[in-house]
Image (cartoon, rainbow, N blue to C red):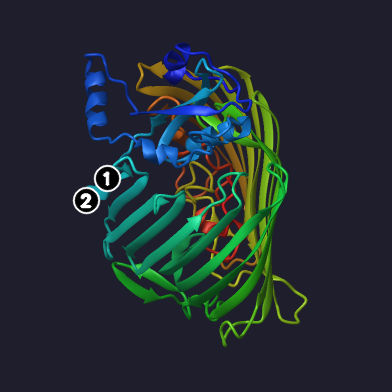
Amino acid sequence: MAAVPGAAAAQVAEREAVPCAGQVITATEIDTRPPFPGAEGTFIARTGRAASKLHTTTRTETVRRYMALGLGDRCDELRRAESERILRAQPFISDATVVALSDGQGGVVLSVTTVDEISLIVGGSLSTSSPHVRSAKLGNRNFFGSGLHAEVRWEDGREFRDVYNIRVTDYQFFGRPYQLAAEAGRLQLGTEWLVDASHPFLTDLQRIAWRVGAGELDTYTRFRRPAADPVHIAVDREYLEAGGVVRIGPVERFFLAGGSITRERVMPGEGPVRMVDGAIVTDTSTVLIGRYIEQRQARANALLGVRLLRFMAVTGFDALDARQDVRKGLQLGFLLGRGFTFLDTKSDEDFFASVSAYAGMGSPSAFTALELNVEGRRAGKEDNWNSVTSSGRFALFARPFLRHTSTASLEWSGGWRSRVPYQVTFASPDGGLRGYRSSQTGGARRLVLRAEDKYVWGRFREYATIGIAGFVDAGKIWAGDSPFGVDTPVRYSAGVSLLVAVPPRSRRLARLDLAYPLNTDGKRRLEARLTVRDFGRVFWKEPRDLYQARERSRPASVFSWP
């Protein structure tokens, strides 16, 4: 039986909690709660109550649609645990508990308690120089308590156009656990849009998963150069995808099999340009001239997944005091694709292969996990593979004490003979080294080691959990075949972090990292970096500087592993 957190303790105490063992569910009780309780009269309490007034608590019907058990069903422990886990996985829910309570007559009452994340989205950036306001963001992660995410963003374009972007995601499209995402925006130079409808693979209890998506990105890829201004090359990319998979076998030990149709077109610019005083100027370097050519692929793909997994609830791994469900066991995803001219008369008749692998083992006090994604392409009768791209993470978590977690993480991002412009750098905000924002070096492959020691300081009333951490980063870049690539020595940085989770037990963590570079690479000065994102819902998210080189037909783009 799962442990019951403090949020539901009072409710459970009134009746006896019992294991699910086939009893008939005679009633369901759903208690959805806002992020803050707010009963005190202090300034902080009043602020919490004011924030709650701007928040619409998740509707009971929204919660009910994620449940794998309902009125009249036989209570099953696997379905109870999966219902709880699926609710915790939603980005608008901070914590969830599903408990079976005896009704005194041989049946059970299913008691569901959820605590919301803060739904209001307010963000931006300021500068001491003009313009003082550099960006702004406003939205809501849970409009009307229905699981609808909507936000708008503006960014000052400096010498070029201002950036505008709107993003909408409905996590219960048509009143089902389907997802519909739409995004459109104007970039400084170019535009982007995407539409994506899917039924992600959320649980082993599911039989099918599917996805249909299309999008276009018209932008410029930047290449950093040592001791010189960066250069850019235009890239216009269009894609279309439709596919699905079916579960074959029992839960916790099964296959996923299916297929997809993908179509993609990549149109690079003819040569490099520089951005100078609000104008696009042709660069005199010759490295990028004719380097990338137009590509068209239309493929039929076979998909196969193997899953031998169980979930384990832990606390304090990637977040502070939030419960997260880590995967123990093994899962593999395979894609084999073949290009056909009947799908597109200008398509290359190539072969494409992709592998996604995950393995995890351990306990709530010591855990290790590995995730790796590799893909590559071979044209026609050629023997050599190109557009080979790989990334992954290997992590060790040690939690010897209740408030203390030590983490070591090795992260890899790289490619060979890419047909799409890209460059990995130390300056990347999600894949590089903290403290090296001004680094001007880049290459084809990057390896980063991160070590962190984290301590949960404690709760600030019922409104936040506060933690502190010390960290060391080390990384190396290999030039490979990347234009302007450089083989670097190992670079180091060190620093401290202030960690805040609002509300307590939230996986949405605000990190203020103060990092100092221990080597000279760009401006050597203390760097402050504020990051707010969900920790603990995804083990590995590929850095954006490598992701732009990826094909859009991958196993994860057809079905989403939880």
Relative depth, front residue between 550 and 354: 354
**For residue 137, side relative to residue 307 (left or right):** left
Q: Residue furthest right?
A: 383
Q: Residues within 10 Å of mark 1 (few under 14, many from 20)?
A: few
**Quarter occupied by residue 197:** bottom left
Q: Residue furthest bottom?
A: 345
**Do we see residue 302 in this rendering?**
yes
Residue placed at 41% from the left, 63% from the top?
195
Q: Residues within 10 Å of mark 2 (few under 14, many from 20)?
A: few
**Quarter occupied by residue 373:** bottom right
Question: Do labels 1 and 2 touch, CB within 8 Å?
Answer: yes
Q: Amino acid at mark 2?
A: Ser
Image location of residue 136, percent across then percent down:
27, 48
Image location of residue 437, percent across then percent down:
45, 48
Task: State the mark number for residue 130.
Answer: 2
Q: Which element type, helix, strand or loop, lies under badge 1? A: loop
Vertically, is 14 above or below 49?
A: above
Relative depth, front residue between 215 and 420: 215
**For residue 407, side relative to residue 87 (left or right):** right
Q: Which element type, helix, strand or loop, lies under badge 2? A: loop
Image location of residue 341, percent across then percent down:
61, 85
Q: Amino acid at mark 1?
A: Ser
Task: State the mark number for residue 127.
Answer: 1
Task: State the mark number for residue 399.
Answer: none
Residue placed at 50% from the left, 47% from the top?
430
**For residue 112, side relative to residue 442 (left or right):** left
